[in-house]
Every structure is written in C-alpha cells, then in structure tokens.
Image: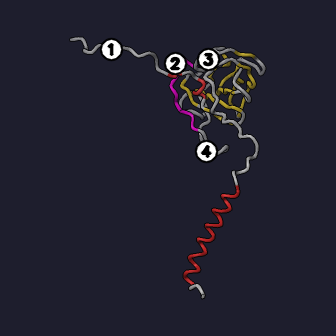
Amino acid sequence: MRTPHRARIRSVPLLALATVLTSAAWAGPPARRGPTPPDPAAAVPAVARLWPVGTRPAVVRGWDPPETPYGPGHRGVDLAARPGDPVRAVADGRVVFAGEVAGRGAVSVELSGTGSPPLRTTYEPVRASVHEGDAVSAGDVVGTLEAPAVHCLSTCLHWGLRRGAAYLDPLSLLPPWLLSRGPSRLLPLHAPAR
C-alpha cells in the first residue's frame, strides 16, 4: 500500500531528527584540544599597597574591556591627577619598559610573585625617572605625570594592567581597604540649635 504524499513529507523530518539524536548520543563527549588555559582574570592578587597617584584619586574613566582583541574599549583606568604629580609603583617589581610610546612617556613594571606570566602594570603619560631593569618597591616614584594628552579631557594618569596579552582591571590589584572611602563615622541624631 502506498503512503500518501503528505504523510511521507511529515515522516522525513522525524526520521532526520531521530538520526541526529542517535548519532549525537553515540558521539560521546566533545574532543579536547589540549589543556584549558587558565582565566587570566581569575588570579589577580590584591598586591597593591597604594594608589599610583594621590591618596584616593577620582576615577575619571573606568575599565571597559573590549569584546574582541582589537575592538573598542578602555584597557585601563584614568585617575585624576595634575601635571608634575609623582607617579608611584603600586607594588614591588622590576621596570620592564621606560620610554615613549606613540609620543607619550610610559613606564611598565612587572610585579613580583604574581604568577606566570606575571602581572604587568603600565603608567602613562609619565616622564620616567627609572630605567629598564630597575627594581622598585611599592611607593617608589617611577616618574612624574606629564601635561595633558588627548586621552583625557583634563589631566589624568592612565593606569593599566596585563597578564600576558590579556588586559585586566587595575583596580583589582587594590585591597578593599584602599578602595573604600574610609571608616564610618557616627553623627549626632539631632543638629545643635542655632
């Protein structure tokens, strides 16, 4: 007996679906292509002991990671500061670059004891007072902030953080007590009469 044309059309998609499900069940787990690389952001230790400028500078622009390696974004944070302000290493490390990049002064410090590949902080625009290979401790001056560039509307320090090729949020280096605005204060319930 012949199956009507309409019934054959309906049974073909069901047969195809059954074939796909059966082959997927027999395929087993997906093949691995080697070890999964660790997430670079997962292990950012709070090793910073101070802010790179001032005691609690305003964050003019926050970290905004790009969706793709060459996509738009902000690969660091901008901190309010004045030209001539000292720029300090936030943690112990070794200077791996001190010079100019695209006409702006920059300093890069590889942080000690931060894993492999190690974390690296960058500071710009900075007139370097250190040289490549110099050891620095937290709080050591690495340079002075240069006059405003096109990066900020007013003067700011661009502070960056990388692990290998991955850009990370430099604020993650700061322990919670450096990020807070200070201890809570109790105020009187009633204002004094005037």
Q: Which residue is mark 3?
A: 86
Residue type, mark 3 in image: Pro
Residue 56 among those drawn in magenta: yes
Residue lying farthest to the front in this orientation: 1
Q: Check if mark 4's residue and mark 1's residue have beta carbons within 8 Å.
A: no
Q: Earlier in the sequence, mark 2 or mark 3?
A: 3
Residue 192 rendering spot, x and y as whole percentages: 24, 11
Q: Is residue 3 above or below residue 139?
A: below
Q: Which residue is mark 2?
A: 177
Q: Which mark is residue 187?
A: 1
Residue 102 vs residue 6, the one in the foreground: 6
Residue type, mark 4 in image: Glu
Q: CA distance from mark 2 to mark 3?
A: 22 Å
Q: Main secondary structure of the magenta part?
A: loop
For mark 4, give the secondary structure.
Answer: loop
Label 2: few (<14), some (14–19) or many (≥20) C-alpha neighbours in 10 Å? few
Q: Is residue 32 above or below residue 114?
A: below
